[in-house]
Amino acid sequence: MTSSKGSTTGWIADIFEPVIPADGVRQGQGGEVYLPIGSTDFARTVTQLASHQFTLIGLVGIEGFGQGPGTSLLYIFEKLEHILILIADGDGTLPSIAKVFPSASWFERECRDGFGVEFKDAFDTRRLFLHETYPDNFHPLKKSFANAPITPKKDVTPADEYPFRKVSGDGVYQVPVGPVHAGIIEPGHFRFSVIGETIFNLEVRMFYKHRGIEKLAEGKETGQCLAVAEAVSGDESVANTTAFCMAAEQIAGVTVPERAWYIRTILLEMERITSHLGDQGGMLVDVGFPLGANQFSVLREDMMRQNAVFTGSRFLRGMIRIGGVVRDMPNEDLEFLASFLSMFRKRYQVGLKIVLSTTSVIDRFATTGVISRSLIQPLALSGPVARASGSTGDTRIQHPYGLYDRYRPAVRTLHDGDVLARFTVKAAEIVASLDLIEQLIKEMPAGPVVTDVAVRNGHSLALVESARGQNLCWLQVRNGRIERYKVRTASFCNWQAIGHAVLENILPDFPVINKSMNLSYAGTDL
Amino acid sequence: MSLDFIIYLIINTAFILLIAPLFAGLIRKVKAWTQGRQGPPVLQQYYNLAKLFRKEIIYSPHASWIMRATPLVNMAAIMVAALFVPLVFVPEPVGGIGNIILFLYLLALARFFMALAGLDAGSSFGGMGSSREMSIAAIIEPTTIIVFAALAIVFKSFNIFVMFASSAATGALTTPTIILIGISLFIILIVETSRIPVDNPETHLELTMIHEGMILEQTGRNLALMELSAAVKLTLLMALMINLIIPAGLAVTLTAAGIFIAAILFILKGSLLAVIIGLFESSMAKKRFFQLPSLFAMAFFFSTLIIIIEVFA
């Protein structure tokens, strides 16, 4: 984000003038640019942004952000290193922009559930995270609703049931799968429409584990909220906590000590390695090749044990705090980590060689579950899923945070968009992360690992690249307490690609396509 | 029916029921070892069966008499088929017992009822398993017929007893056809017993299941019968391969010592074959469903080759 400072208004003017007066532009603490927009100019502005290939990466609803007590909507757009946030009033006069930016569909439905904001001409007005048993006119993110248990509806009439898309015809079958699955995974419902084995429609219904995380954070002091940020998604704990801390630090205007960023970056990359290993093992289990799968699951278990040795947590929890990290990593520990990783690298290469030289595995991976490049911008896809389909996007490169402007990770882009491409991209990212960690350990400076952070009011946006892709964190502090905490994980957007990826594939290939995309249920359903 | 034959019926049935779970357990153990795991004990299959036989049966409210009858029909069909394949002692054939075509269709009868039961409970996974099983059955059946035809031409008989007796007399086939028959029978064994690369017996993913999908709704004693019949079927097909290709020690006269030695040798040979199956399964991923015919085509090709060699050479 630092790179956009200095010439803030230049690129904004290029986009809008002479069509829309871009006055009222101001720059946020994280380098993002805010532009309040009236409902008359809104549609034109959005069209203009679409024609400039912006991506809608988030929509944050906040009460009392503007002049009145009403709900403001913050549309967050991204193009390369630029972040533009349109501020509009959610008073029901705004049109739905899902036809221009398809990623808006879930965002708008989320805001509609949370705040009761209506969007004109929306083509999908079904509830999103509030299932049928939630009471009518219940909007939990409104300030008028106090966080307390609610009484769910007892009787759900067939008319209230969630309407799935109806598909009919000769030999068409609907196969409902979930929300309870075999094995230890999270809940989600998949409604397949198939002819024989071939899938021609898949509708995903998520949000079976809504925890009210955003509401839970409200009213807490920022320091109390770290455990909440860690709980967003188990294997993205470091990424989400780092994003939360970055936003809090930007609001407070503090600079985190150098050594703390080295430790944070090591943890971020270790988290990426652990997560990718789990996927790679899972993908091999799903094509029935446990011999190969175990190469990776054994490594993942070893990695998690190392995580526990270094941080006391297999999921690297409890290390990141606002202003730095909770405790220093002694140099002996770091040397041990370096020697562990060099062993790890050799074992990983052996495992990778076994898998990539097994033709039956390649045969199952190649051409399976293709995600077209043309979906990346409309659905705001990110992470290995996007990079396997031709995207060069990586938050660490486009919006470098911490040390990533100096330590640029090698980004691998492939173009096939299939399961094999995603597997290969993840393998390359594991190696890149190993390189990065080894370099960081070598060059780590001495010094303090935490700095004092005074509480200040304000708001900020932070973007990080988790193992799954771009995670977005919006934080607003008022009177020393959290007014609004909004997280949008990569999975929230990437989930919407799976309905496209499975088309014309056969049902038995669904598990491996799903695993290759590594979508978090918890990260989607806050 | 001679006394020898009655003793054969008793010995063969008792022996196959006794050893069938062993090989399934051994395959699982070998697969675990290749993955660097300990795996469940080799005798785990016995413990599972003992446990399941004691458990109650639960039927889906949608299930009809088919669900109730299938485990029994299935077990009965497989046990009759088991009479057709002498494991340790080959008596003189009596009537149609031992006819290889009848043997094939006894297995088909069991499979037919299993597929019906998969549909019967009304779960979507059962239906998918049944539909896949019947697709595979339709494709593998002509191949199996050709393989059996090749056997019939090589041994000049349709009767498994006669085939075993003649291979036991000659010790082992010494022609290259032994390799070809071995490959064809091995592929049929893999397909019929739902193993990788056709099906994955150890998967938890319902969407990918074939055999396991069909028996998902089975419980308690019924599940035990389905599991046991699957183990017996595996042992039968293994025995077909073993006694045709490495028949050494197979008893053709009824003596206690001969049968004892044959039984020991059979367990050893079976264990060796189980290890090979386990290694084979570990060496590859499951095939994509619609590419399975390429595997069957291999068995078809080799058997056709045998027929050509035997008829024209």
Image (cartoon, helix red, strand yellow):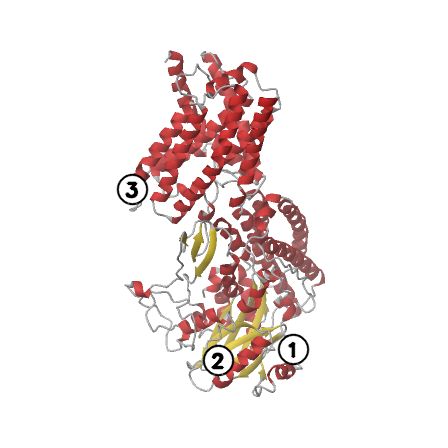
The quarter in which the N terminus of chain B is drawn is top left
Along the horizontal axis of the image, is A440 left or right of B271? right
Which residue in the structure is indicated by mark 3?
A: B64
Residue found at x 54% / y 14%: B169
- Residue A394 at x, y percent in the picture: 62, 66
Q: Is residue A491 above or below residue A451?
A: above
The quarter in which the C terminus of chain B is drawn is top right
Mark 2–mark 3 contact, CB under 8 Å? Answer: no
Q: Nearer the viewer, residue B169 or A84?
A: B169
Gap in angstroms between the C-alphas marked 2 and 3 = 65 Å
For residue A51, what is the image quadrant?
A: bottom right
Mark 1 residue type:
Ser
Chain of the residue that carries numbered disc 1 in the rendered image: A
Mark 1–mark 2 contact, CB under 8 Å? Answer: no
Element type where label 3 sits in the image: loop
- Residue A194 at x, y percent in the picture: 44, 53
Q: Nearer the viewer, residue A35 or B143?
A: B143
The mark closer to the camera, 1 or 2, is 1
Mark 1–mark 3 contact, CB under 8 Å? Answer: no
Q: Nearer the viewer, residue A20 or A223?
A: A20
Rate crowding at label 2 as few (under 14), some (14 to 19) or many (20 or more) other CA atoms within 10 Å: some
Element type where label 1 sits in the image: helix
Q: Are marks 1 and 2 on the same chain?
A: yes
Mark 3 residue type:
Ser
Label annotation for residue A4: 1
Gap in angstroms between the C-alphas marked 1 and 2 = 27 Å
Q: Is residue B41 visible?
A: no
Gap in angstroms between the C-alphas marked 1 and 3 = 70 Å
